Image (cartoon, rainbow, N blue to C red):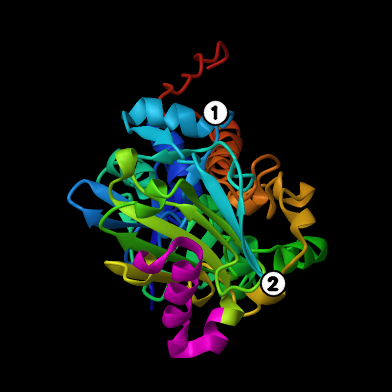
Amino acid sequence: MSQRTSRSVVVIGAGASGLAAASILTQAGHDVVVLEARERIGGRLLSAQATPEGFLDLGATWFWDDERHVRTLLADTGLGSFPQHTTGDAVYQDAGGIQRLAGNPIDARSNRFTAGAASLTDALAAALPSGTLRLSTPVTAIRSSPSGLGVHTPDFVIEAEHVVLAVPPALALAAIDFDGQLPADLVRAAEQTPVWMGAVVKVVAAYPEAFWRRDGLAGAAFSRTGPLQEIHDMSGPDGQPAALFGFAHASAARSAGPDFRTAVTGQLAHLFGAQAAQPLALHVQDWSAEQWTSPAQVAQLGDYSLFGHRLYQRPTLDGRLHWASTETARDYAGHIEGALAGGERAAHAILHALPDPNEEPVQAEPSLSA
């Protein structure tokens, strides 16, 4: 028989949305546990260390000036940021060859995280009370119970008053057994909602120096022939560590098999010169192959109008099950900002529903008839 425990709130997923929700709730004094299926935190915030002080983002990379949740988190944690490098010309590739585009019309003004995007989730996790995080703990089922919701894992069951689903909706429906309790319209929407980055391969090529800048190139490219469809400069502040990164469709990368890496370096050499053919390291992150990010049907999910769907804005299962991933955000869905906003929305709904644990209970006045 599985061990049974109880908590006020169970958060499923230790990415940006789940950790943001847990941070708000624990600061308010609630008893929270975060269950993460992976052996690491961060979700789609994943940074590889390239040098002792330099990081390369294999997942989320950018944020923008108007994203207040990200800005607030950076200010609260003291983490640094810097502008995305955009100076120089871009390159366009199609079946007819390669063109140099003056003025870089590809890159938009954006910002990067000095210590990598995963530094955000590292900071959120570090501030949680000891014992809040449980890694390598997939959730297999959620059941309504007299006291709230039963959250089932392979080893134990937690009775919770509220549950935060901080994973992509389509993944939640594929990986967790809800025993037919969810409304049919919500199930249809969740099963069809795309997973941000779920069907792409992100490739990061590290180099000794950002040599393309010497040639007046921004490191930005758009290609209709691939394998990488778009490419950007991922170098750190002052150009170190030096890197380029790009995106490919997961289906194209898989069909190329072992030749994919060779095809990538060949394309980079065509676009940026012979030096690009010899990266110090080539990181290939296939998000479609991540069991705890993408369901099996992820490549067929293409209706992005489902991002921020109205059904995600309110809790279900008697107001106890809350949606929080970036796909559920009304604004900035698919951004880190959307994930943080989704976590905040879920946390505030729970704070409104649960009594303040820091308030002293009101003592009843003695009855005059006693």
Residue furthest to the top = 368
Q: Secondary structure at mark 1?
A: helix
The picture places residue 354, in percent across and down from the top left corner, at 54, 36
For label 2, the residue is 96
Question: Residue 222: image x %, image y %?
Answer: 61, 60
Q: Position of residue 165 (x, y in %)?
A: 56, 55
The residue depicted at 56 percent of the width and 51 percent of the height is: 90
Looking at the image, can residue 67 be seen?
Answer: yes
Measure how far apart labels 1 and 2 are at the Cα level: 43 Å
The question of residue 114 being in magenta is answered with no
Within 10 Å of disc 2 (Cα), the crowding (few <14, some 14-19, many 20+) is few
First of labels 1, 2 by sequence position: 1
Span highlighted in magenta in the image? 253-275
Write down the residue under mark 1. Answer: 68
Say which amino acid is labelled 1.
Arg
What's under tag 2, amino acid-wise? Gly
Tag 2, which secondary structure? loop
Q: Nearer the viewer, residue 351 or 190?
A: 190
